[in-house]
Amino acid sequence: MTTPREHEHLRSLVVDLRESEVIAEVTRLLEAGDTPERILESCQQGMAIVGELYEQSRYYIAGLIMAGKIMQELSEMLEPHFQQRFHGEASGKVLMATVQGDIHYIGKNLVKTLLKCHGFTVRDLGEDVSPQDILNAVLEFKPDVIGLSALLTACFDPLRDTIAHLRTNLPPDVKLPPIMIGGGATDDVVRQYVRADHWAADAISGVAICKKIVANP
Amino acid sequence: MSKSPEEFFAEKEARVNTAIALGVPDRVPVTCMTGFFPAYYAKVSLREVMYDADKMIAAWTKTLQDFDFDTADNPFMIRFLGAIMEALDYKQLKWAGHGVDEMSGYQFVEGEYMKPEEYDDFIFDPTDFMIRRYWPRIFGALAPLAELPPLSEIITYSMGLGNFAALAAPGMREVGQALIKAAEAGQQMAKNAGQFAGVIKAMGFPSTYQGFTQAPFDTLSDYFRGTLGGMMDMFRHADKLMAATEKMLPIMLRLGLSTKKRGGTKVFIPLHKGLDGFMSNDQFKRFYWPSLKALMEGLIAEGLIPVVLWEGECTSRLEIIGDIPAGKAVYHFERTDIFKAKEIIGDRVCLKGNVPLSLMVTGTPDDVRAYCKKLIDVVGKGGGFILDAAAPADDAKPENLQAMIQAAKDYGRYA
């Protein structure tokens, strides 16, 4: 049986983004007979601290990208060992997409990483997604928040069209969740132009907005 | 009596150059990186202007006739690329009619075009790595080059002459044909670029810049390792990333200095990965800034003017980036707090910008005018300022561009 001290060590390796040592330590703990649930819990605690450090501007996008990579590797390592999925349903569900006409994903994926650090379930429809595909996913996934990303100024109109499509074409018995936009040259002026509910200036405020929406539905 | 184009040219050039030297010109210069705006304005598709030089010249000429900027963009070198990219089956961009619709601008295809385990090969011999590894990945038509032996081993009768046999491998003839096609399209582009430079000058406009280079870190991260790779390498492969950046510096410097051979003075340097948020100030000081500073100093030492577009926000870097020779460069800011920049580095470097694209695209002329007035009053105070949109304004409303120009004329007089 492993000790709390060993888990504290694992947690701090995650926080310090020491990728190869994290992998080695997880391998060792699994071999020592530790449960994947317990290992995952320690790693997720580490990830939450990474998220906090980013929010405090002590970590940067580079660190968040690295954390996302470690999390992906951990998920691949641990998934075969247990049934439970690598997320918590409790924090809420966010549907994300980069709108039609735009193929950029880095900012969107950062928000996704950070949301996962905070226990959200995220469905990512990818890039260059049509309004109808987003609408279908809203009906099927029933998100608490819709996050739409656009880097290019040329995509202000597709962003507006997507939101109009959602507002117009959703069946009357389905309530449209709040829509948050972000990315590139978006700002509050653009938010008004496209008729979104929220604008996320960066990944941190994106998470803060999602948390607030879920806390006060 | 109205002024001749020569007089306009001299007046505009003096206005801009005085601001760059941190002096006080007759009024605040106003310019705009218009991107593909002229095509939208002339109501021709982007596809058409990228492949038809006459249409490109007509659209950009119309824009210059209607918008009285103090400098003008020559679009050919980075926009008349359709035929060249087509010939090479270029993979790193989607462009009008090629992956995106005919009215859409460029979209960069992020990717890991160099693997982390290939750093040593790049550092040992960047040219060899590019020809045999990088080009085959970014140009579909040059894929067979991956089968070549190292070119530096073809030395003399006793070393390497037999290696020419590799050029008989399957697909090499097609490589040759693709290169010839690209060469011819490149010649055509250079000819059109020269022709349009003449048009711009004859109309009385100095050109905004005449050369191009990038920060060594950005070149590696944008095109070779990808954004994700570049960011992760600061943790995983710090020493190799540093060594590769140092290797890239003289390449980027030589590219920038080629501006001088063409008789130019201004070198455009768009920056991407050094933004606030992407990396810490410690990482910026270690991985990003030293080679960028050396690049700018190298250009300045040869009498060239770096025109640096700090994309995104860089407010937290202001204390660091003022450390360059005074009055020899332009910093164009997108979202950086330009008012704070005026306080911190306004006595070192000419500031340019930064009317938000959201205003240019969705706002009204009154919004734009009000923002410009504030910029002129505060950032323009005492000279050393060029009014511009925050970044290339492809999708701006024409009336908003006019409002920006008019604001410089109405509020920007120093005398």
Image (spheres, rainbow, N blue to C red):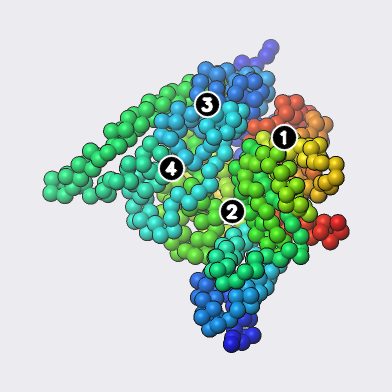
Checking the image for residue A157, the label placed there is 1
Do circles 2 and 1 both sit on a common chain? no
Position of B154 with respect to A12 (left or right) is left
- Which x, y percent locates residue B358? 74, 39
Checking the image for residue B50, the label placed there is 3
Please tell me which residue lies in front, A35 or A198. A35
Q: In which quarter of the image is the N terminus of chain A?
A: bottom right
Circle 3 or circle 1, nearest the eye: 1
Chain at tag 4: B
Query: Quick check: can you spot residue B334?
Result: no
Query: How far apart are labels 1 and 4 at the CA level?
Result: 31 Å
Q: Residues within 10 Å of mark 2 (few under 14, many from 20)?
A: many
Kind of residue at disc 4: Ile
Residue marked by disc 4: B138
Residue marked by disc 2: B274
Position of B402 with respect to B125 (left or right) is right
Tell me the element at label 3.
helix
The residue lying at 44 percent from left, 58 percent from top is B116
